[in-house]
Amino acid sequence: MNTEKSFMKYGFINDVNNAKLKEIFKDGTKIREIHMDIYPDNPIDNSMLFMLLLRTIEKNVLVTNDDNRIILKKNDKYKTCFVNVLLSKITECFFRTFENCIEFILNIHNTYYRVTILN
């Protein structure tokens, strides 16, 4: 199944030029809670069995965005960085919104990231 069609089937919208991603992850934003899952294949496509590589849940997150790179850090005394991504390396970006959260699926170097933001 076509990747874009499979995302559209489940209510995801193609984020052209990562516009929504840049809007949500603007510089200085504080995120209450973020959930990230990483998969080697498309997590939406039901024709494949998917394998979860990594899952992280972080609370109280600070965003740094310089229009080239998105950096997510824990808002603690050490400012631990847990995501550092070049925007130019995001080849696919889809999102869907709910009442109090937004979900993104990103493809970076043929690895799929499912990011859910709760605010």
Image: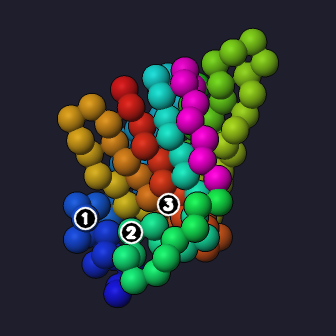
Per the model, the C-alpha gap separating discs 2 and 3 is 12 Å
Mark in the foreground, 2 or 3: 2
Question: Pointer 2: what residue?
Answer: 44
Residue at the far right in the pictured view: 78
Q: Does the magenta stretch include residue 55?
A: yes
The residues bearing labels 3 and 1 have C-alpha atoms spaced at a distance of 15 Å
**Residue on which the image places disc 1:** 10
Q: Can residue 102 be seen in this view?
A: yes
Q: Earlier in the sequence, mark 2 or mark 1?
A: 1
Res 73 quadrant in image: top right
Which residue, given by chain and number where applicable, does mark 3 sit on?
Answer: 106
Instruction: Give the total of numbered labels.
Output: 3
- Check contact, mark 2 vs mark 1: CB within 8 A: yes
Picture layout, residue 29 above or below residue 66: above
Where does the magenta region start and end? 54-61
Q: Name which residue type carries label 1.
A: Tyr
Outermost residue to the top = 77
